[in-house]
Amino acid sequence: DLGGGGWLKRVCASLGGCGPDARLPPCTPRVALLNRPGSPMLKHRSHTNRAVMACLGLLLVAGCSREPDADYLASGRDFLQRKEYASALIQLRNAAGRDPEHAETRYLLGLALRGTATPVSAEVELRRALELGHAPEQVLPVLCRSLLDTAQYDKVIDLAASRQVGEAATRAELKALWAEALAAKGQPVPARRLYEEALALDPANATARLGT
């Protein structure tokens, strides 16, 4: 228990008192006893030194405790907002090391990995985020884009066609990414139809507006 200070009182008690009221015995008559081999006073001094070193070790451990998971996660978010993807990756990997089952951490790792042009690893993290229950509205568009980055067009089509999401803006984006995959496969007619469906859901959708 480092928080309440009880450990320090116990150590001080074992040393004969550490407070301002502790009484120190006269030193002069005991100098010879302290230096005599096998002297109880010499043994006590050795015990005291070990106890003091133990106290210092406990204080160092308490002062150098590891950074909390939340700090790593917050730092990773901050780096992502500034588009400093390599720095975000370091912090988010630290957070994932502390809590491998944290869905948001896996999602943010996917964003950072895609930002560092490693879409294959991004796909792994984004799928893991979905498995752990992170919001599909956030994960699916980024996952589809990671699949487009690696020319996995059929996977984009399967994902966009099979997943149901509630938000109109996300549905529009998935249709637009589905259209991107069809266009890349040389199917412009069904791609145009999907672009139009996307714009009907969200007229401001940038992906669909660029595709039409």
Image: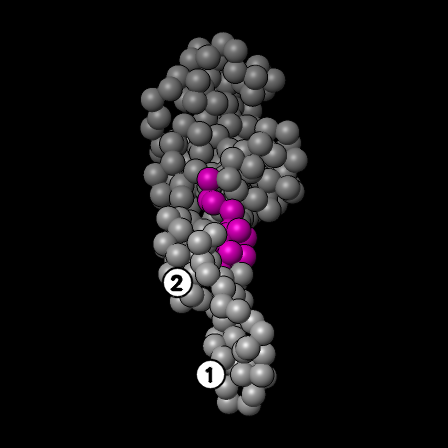
Q: Residue at x 46, y 61 (%)?
A: 23
- Amino acid type, residue under disc 1 in the picture: Pro
Task: Say what secondary structure mark 1 lies in.
Answer: helix
Mark toward the start of the polypeptide (1 vs 2): 2
Q: Nearer the viewer, residue 119 or 196?
A: 119
Mark 1: give few (<14), some (14-19) or many (20+) Cα within 10 Å: few
Task: Say what secondary structure mark 2 lies in.
Answer: helix
Q: Position of residue 25 (x, y in %)?
A: 49, 68
**Would you say residue 10 sits in the magenta stretch?**
no
Q: Nearer the viewer, residue 65 or 79?
A: 65
Q: Main secondary structure of the magenta part?
A: helix
Residue placed under numbered mark 2 in the picture: 13
Mark 2: give few (<14), some (14-19) or many (20+) Cα within 10 Å: few
Q: Residue at x 55, y 90 (%)?
A: 37
Depicted 45 relative to depicted 139: above or below: below
- The reply to whether residue 208 is visible in this rendering is yes
- The reply to whether residue 187 is visible in this rendering is no
Give the magenta-colored segment's residue range: 58-70
Residue 174 falls in image quadrant: top left
Q: Position of residue 128 (x, y in %)?
A: 42, 46
- Amino acid type, residue under disc 2 in the picture: Ala
Q: Residue at x 40, y 44 (%)?
A: 102
User: By what rule are the colours in the image chosen?
Assistant: one colour
Q: Which mark is residue 40?
A: 1
Q: Nearer the viewer, residue 113 or 35?
A: 35
Callout 1–callout 2 Cβ contact below 8 Å:
no
Q: Which mark is residue 80?
A: none
